[in-house]
Amino acid sequence: MRPWDDHRLVLIEREVKGDRGVIVFDAPTIAPLLWPGQFINLKVPGLLLRRPMAPAVLSSRLLLFVRGRGEGTQHLLTLSPGTVLRALAPLGNGFPLPEGRAVLVSGGTGAGPLLHLARFLVKRGHEVVLLHGAKDRSEAFFAPYLRASGASVRFFTEDGSWGERGYPTDALPFVLRPGDTLFAVGPEAMMQKAAGVARTMALPAYVSLEAHMACGVGSCLSCAVPTAKGQRHVCTDGPVFPAEEVRFHLEPA
């Protein structure tokens, strides 16, 4: 029996500002199944290939932080409430549970899967710190969703127009402490820096990778990435990997 299925979702709310948006779907058949860090492969009306998305779960609803970078995400931001979509789910592995405190570092739309993780862990009694970074205040409307997670949240912008000036990784050496587990989702440079700080402090760290996917279920093999354990596939072996296994593109040859 396959571990995933094709589900029906209904778009019920959206808030769009510029090229970024928060989209909420009614998804009662997916929400109970989705472990933090797993993803869905969303069929956007009018487009052939599905788009992999890692949402947060809010009761029976899914919440997506979206940036309109390509045809699929740009079109997704224009859809009206009431639009019915289909999604393969649940896909991928997901984050492991930490033993103690969790420190989460997100950038841009990486806030989605980490919002899911934060809510999940807080409900189970874990202390959670969430550091979110953006270029400027264009993502300030993400703030209420992140604060509602129950985590201790700090915001950073490169230009200082929202929250603290700088990068979330700047704060990591002062936030992390023995016994913590680090989780990072966002731009590769941010994840690499976060993983390096955790490695220096001998703490476990996990990152979630992005890749172009045609199927999302391991059939097309288009999402292969090099790791310390050889070629792995983001859709089936990931998207979450221990940071020490990842071969970041920014690393010197």
Image (spheres, rainbow, N blue to C red):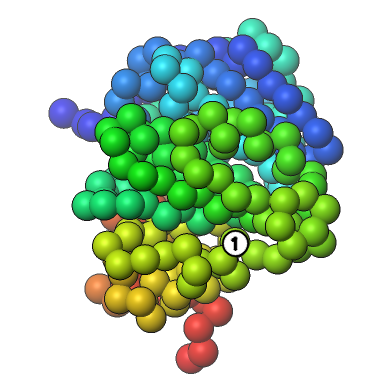
Q: Residue at x 54, y 18 (%)?
A: 25
Residue 27 locus on image (x, y percent): 45, 16
Kind of residue indicated by mark 1: Pro
Q: Is residue 104 visible?
A: yes
Q: Residue furthest left?
A: 1
* Element at label 1: helix
Q: Residue at x 59, y 61 (%)?
A: 168
Q: Residue furthest top?
A: 82
Q: Which residue is mark 1?
A: 168
Quarter location, residue 141: top right
Residue 133 locus on image (x, y percent): 64, 55
Q: From what the image shows, is residue 108 above or below residue 165?
A: above
Quarter location, residue 22: top right
Residue 4 locus on image (x, y percent): 29, 30
Side (left or right) of 176 relative to 42 = left
Q: From what the image shows, is residue 28 above or below residue 21?
A: above
Q: Residue at x 50, y 13 (%)?
A: 26
Q: Is residue 215 visible?
A: no
Side (left or right) of 4 relative to 70 = left
Mark 1 nearby-residue class (10 Å; few <14, some 14–19, many ≥20): many
In the rendered view of the protein, which quadrant contains the N terminus? top left
Q: Residue at x 41, y 33 (%)?
A: 119
Q: From what the image shows, is residue 82 above or below residue 25?
A: above
Side (left or right) of 118 relative to 130 = left
Residue 12 locus on image (x, y percent): 61, 12
Side (left or right) of 28 relative to 15 = left
Quarter location, residue 189: bottom right
